[in-house]
Image (cartoon, helix red, strand yellow):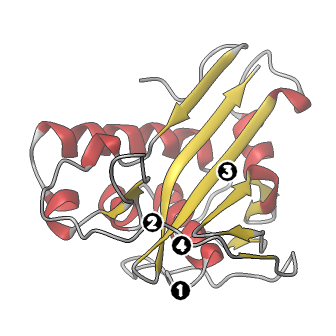
Amino acid sequence: MSWIAGAGAVVAMSVVTACSDDSTAQQAEPGSSSSSTAEAGTPTPTPTKGQTADQSTVQGAVAGWVTAIVQDRPKNACLVMGTPATSSSPARANTEATCSGSGSQAKKMEQQIHSLHASFAPESSTSDPKVTVAKVPVKGKTAVVPGKQVTIDGQTLTAIVLSHSTGVQKGDVGIKIEATDIDGSWYVTNLNLSVG
């Protein structure tokens, strides 16, 4: 699947569908109905290469996931991902076995992360990018982070994706990263990327 396509393309991705057929994944209870809002603009520590993400917050999980993609580390990105809840099953976190596997699902996930790397990495990216994620409202056990609320080395994720696209105008790129609280830790469970 191509992540950045020509104008008019819309990609909605359950980021873990490609790597979540592991039957040992932990189960979580469906979300509560509470809602909270936090201040925007607070920097989020970026995990260093080889370090896992701080999954105690939405910002930590999303920053860890984006950092792993920018550094082209599919396994690290996969470990911060989970399957979103459906009407018939609760959200599930990916496992080490799922993310380290050599089966077709793990290989597909790795290819998808490599594709995202090409779109998410700034032109002047370093091996240790500074990723900042603004705090966003949490509704129940989910939160959605717009691409304009994620910065990589001072540039928004939306602007970076736009810079890698041709024939696309500033307002034509939309990015939404969904995170879900699964058993007290946050995981990226969906990506909605629209171009055009």
User: Label 2 vs label 4: CA separation?
Assistant: 19 Å
Q: Amino acid at mark 1?
A: Ser
Image point (68%, 47%), residue name: 176
In front of the other: label 1 or label 3? 1
User: Label 1 vs label 2: CA separation?
Assistant: 18 Å
Q: Position of residue 137 (x, y in %)?
A: 77, 69
Q: Amino acid at mark 2?
A: Pro
In front of the other: label 3 or label 2? 2
User: Label 3 vs label 2: CA separation?
Assistant: 37 Å
Q: Position of residue 60 (x, y in %)?
A: 58, 78
What residue is shown with label 4? Answer: 61
What residue is shown with label 3? Answer: 122
Who comes first in sequence, dot 4 or dot 1?
A: 1
Q: How many marks?
A: 4
Quarter of the image where the N terminus is located: top left
Pointer 2 with pointer 4, Cβ within 8 A: no
Quarter of the image where the C terminus is located: top right
Pointer 4 with pointer 1, Cβ within 8 A: no
Q: Residues within 10 Å of mark 2 (few under 14, many from 20)?
A: some
Who comes first in sequence, dot 1 or dot 2?
A: 2
- Residue 130 falls in image quadrant: bottom right
Q: Amino acid at mark 4?
A: Ala
Q: Above or below — where is 115 with respect to 34?
A: above
In front of the other: label 1 or label 2? 2
Image point (39%, 80%), residue name: 183
What residue is shown with label 1? Answer: 56
Pointer 1 with pointer 3, Cβ within 8 A: no
Who comes first in sequence, dot 3 or dot 4?
A: 4
